Amino acid sequence: MSRFKNLFTALAAVVLGLLAGAVFMALSGSNPLAGFYYLFRGGLMNMERIGNTLASATTLVFTGLAVAFSFKTGLFNIGASGQMLMGGLTATAIGLSVQMPRMILLPLIVLAAAAAGALWAAIPGFLKAKFNVHEVVATIMMNWIAYWTVYYTIPAYFKGTFLETESRRIPALASFRVEWLTNIFRGSYINMGVFLALTAVIVIAIILEKTTLGFELKAVGFNRYAAEYAGIHVPKNIVLSMSISGILAGLAGATYYLGYAVNMQIGVVPSAGIDGIAVALLGANSPWGVLASSLFFGILHSGKGFMNAMTKVPPEIGDTIIAIIIYFAATGVLFTRLWERITRKWNKEA
Amino acid sequence: MEYIVEMLHITKDFPGIRANDDITVQLRKGEIHALLGENGAGKSTLMSILFGLYRPDAGVIKVRGNEVAIHNPNVANALGIGMVHQHFKLVHNFTVTENIILGMEPTVGPMLQTRDAAKRIKALSEQYGLNVDPDAKIEDISVGMQQRVEIIKMLYRNAEVLIFDEPTAVLTPQEITDLMQIIRNLIKEGKSILLITHKLKEIKAIADRCTVIRRGKVVDTVDVADVAESRMAEMMVGRTVNFTVDKRDQERGEAVLSIRNLNVLSSRKTQALKNFSLDVHRGEILGLAGVDGNGQTELVEALTGLRKVESGSILFKGRDITHDDIHSRVMAGMAHIPEDRQKRGLVLDYTMEDNFILEIYGREPYSHKGFLNRKAIRDHAEKLIRDFDVRSGQGALSMGRTLSGGNQQKAIVGREIDHDPELLLAVQPTRGLDVGSIEYIHKRLVEQRNNGKAVLLVSLELDEIMDLSDRIAVISHGELTGVKLPKETNESEIGLMMAGIAGAGGTE
Ligand SMILES: Nc1ncnc2c1ncn2[C@@H]1O[C@H](COP(=O)(O)OP(=O)(O)OP(=O)(O)O)[C@@H](O)[C@H]1O
Ligand SMILES: [Mg+2]
């Protein structure tokens, strides 16, 4: 029942977002049908494009899951960007300085990045649990600390050969890209992260739905007083929930900087951290919903350049559509009402 | 006869249940009309429809003879209909005035203008004898005063028809007396009132007519003066109700709980319990009587581990648990029916089956190595729902939020009794229950005691304490004023002790 409701809300938001996009395209003097044709073509037209769409989606799955998981447990982690940066920095540091067989090196990088993300999120979790500092404030501050940490660490220790503002190139040994995958998708950015992301979706879905851990975390999220009454240790669960959320964001960093990209640049807050909020919202905070909405946003991301090249539609239209969809997903109550009205009518007639 | 409100042939369906089935209720101008019905009969739903919170699936509502469509509470307000809900809807860190003007804030230009509002609130408060301070914060005032804020909120919006959904369930006996007077004042000023209550005495005392509802259908509407209380109860549950508790005499066993010189602070850091000592024995129901706010809440929270103890000790089954965490106390065999069912007792956004394992999800068979066993959880829920007659649309899968207030309460009581605890801390266990359910819950509490378990019963209702208890302890200002045997005392002596005057002789 509520699952259909969520699906309906999400689809309605998408449709309305696309419609609004069509209006903007028409206003900018282009044919909306052509615009959408090239937008989706750009995301899906050949194996390389599909690979890029999946690669964009990979990062969004991780950050979307990070936000959704925190939401489900009553917290609002908007620090996915910072956790992603720290995960990425840790991964880059290891990738550039450690020599090991790949079979050991890659898992090591994954674990280290997860730990870094977890730590970066656990600090706001601890501040919330212990001193009731709101996690939104704390995670934003942690974002900036991460930003400046990267800003100074990369030039100081991992400076590129030509540019001060980015790290050296990640050696093939430490890269998440693998030849067979790159070959299938004709040289796209796709990498092993895609499998890691799928695994994360499954693991998070299992934690939330099937385990006592998920039972505790959600209970704390819905009603911390009742959780406390029941003997659930609320502060511990807040820190734990933030840590798991941080692990996911940390993995986003590892797969992004060592898979999607080829090095790490300074002075950039990765937008995927914020986009994760949109992904979680549209996916109704369910892991499978996050997967679906990441793919959708992935198409928009990788298609908008092509649309711009083929038509006069400015690439910002893609972002406008995303923004409008977020808006409608956030005001989803309206659609829920509509859904209820429809089902009521339908029931009456039946 | 002139009707101010008529609800004609109202039907309302929720998933899995028809909450209102062709219900007709007509409110005369200037009358107090009671709604009586079992938990889950559909009373709150019907009133929510009148207040615009739900749309009926069928039926007609007329106000002052005109057919109306009440789409939302604003329409209800405009029609002069106001409601005090079963669970209050106030913003806790706002003042009384701010809460009352919420949604219709008076402004001068872009600025909020509260001075006139506060003046008007003061005037209304005096006119109806409500005694409300417009500048107090909600979190600092008693439940009784919060309710009076809700009443002013209605009057401030010029309501003519006032709906009260179980107003007395949360009040102390003194506050109930005050409320009855307030309701009479309201009638004197020309208001009409719809009153939901499970307390037949109250209906007898102030209502003119009473509509009895059973499982969503109207049984009858009667003139209260013509019908005995027992007959009303019978109409409501469909069988005769036994108002007295059967309890065989029995020797009590050893002390399972020993409280020694306990000192506990309240949330406002005042001394809530002072050198409090008390034993609770196996095989007894110990009733704790007292005026609300005299340390009962803090005592129970200290016993369960929800509140820190400043000094003194708590021995449970001979072991010092003063500093144990909540979980280990639960595991050691302590269960707790909390005072506030929606704050502590339930996760409203969990299904009932998940609520039933709130404390025991970690035990076999409900989980194994960290994984939940859905089948065992479902079976457990179905057993409790059957045993305690918890009614809802979708059984084990109903969301906690969708249950009627009384059924939420039954679910919590059932869950806690089902743990078969060595010590049951039962705070207002029958709050909001219909007479039939009260009878059943009382029976189950006595059964615990008969099986050699201990029950600490905290209740504001002296009747309940007198009927159920083997011994009665009285608390006043955080101190124990004395312990009495029910057959050696009476309500007036207990009343004096509640006021802090120690009982003469015969103290246990
Ligand atoms: N929002 C809802 N969604 C689904 N079912 C609901 C909802 N609200 C009420 N119900 C169901 O409708 C029935 C009537 O509920 P209602 O709250 O009107 O009972 P009530 O007569 O007020 O009972 P009580 O005396 O316990 O307060 C119950 O079975 C309840 O589970
Ligand atoms: Mg009710």
Image (tube, coloured by chain):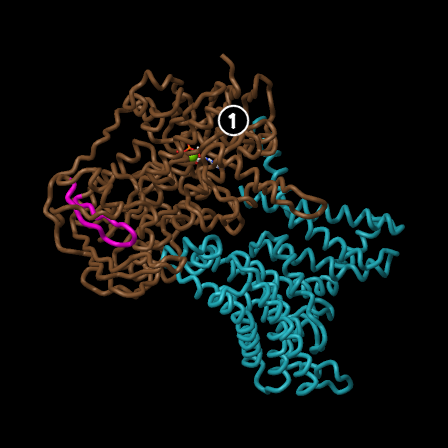
Chain colours: A cyan, B brown
SS state under label 1: strand
Q: Is residue B265 visible?
A: yes
Please determine whether, in this image, residue B364 is positioned above or below residue A142: above
Please determine whether, in this image, residue B113 is positioned above or below residue A63: above
Instruction: Tell me the quarter of the picture where residue B398 sits.
Output: top left
Instruction: Tell me the quarter of the picture where residue A107 sits.
Output: bottom right
Q: Is residue A346 visible?
A: no
- Compared across the picture, whether A258 is left or right of B51 comes to right
For disc 1, the marked residue is B161
Which chain hosts label 1?
A: B
Where does the image place residue B21, in percent across and percent down from the top left?
A: 46, 24
Question: Given the image, on which type of amino acid does mark 1 rest?
Answer: Val
Choose between A303 and A172: the one closer to the eye. Answer: A303
- Compared across the picture, whether B234 is left or right of A68 comes to left
Q: Is residue B172 magenta?
A: no
- Compared across the picture, whether A73 is left or right of B233 comes to right
* Span highlighted in magenta in the image: B470-486
Please determine whether, in this image, residue B134 is positioned above or below residue A237: above
Where does the image place residue B409, in percent across and percent down from the top left?
A: 36, 41
Number of on-image labels: 1
Choose between B39 and A193: the one closer to the eye. Answer: B39
* Residues packed near mark 1 inside 10 Å, few (<14), some (14 to 19) or many (20 plus): many
* Residue at the top extreme, as displayed: B1
Q: Is residue B472 magenta?
A: yes
Indicate which quadrant contains ligand 2.
top left
Q: Main secondary structure of the magenta part?
A: strand
Where does the image place residue B453, in percent across and percent down from the top left?
A: 19, 50
Choose between B169 and A37: the one closer to the eye. Answer: B169
* Point 65% across, 41% down: residue: B106
Where does the image place residue B353, in percent across and percent down from the top left?
A: 39, 46
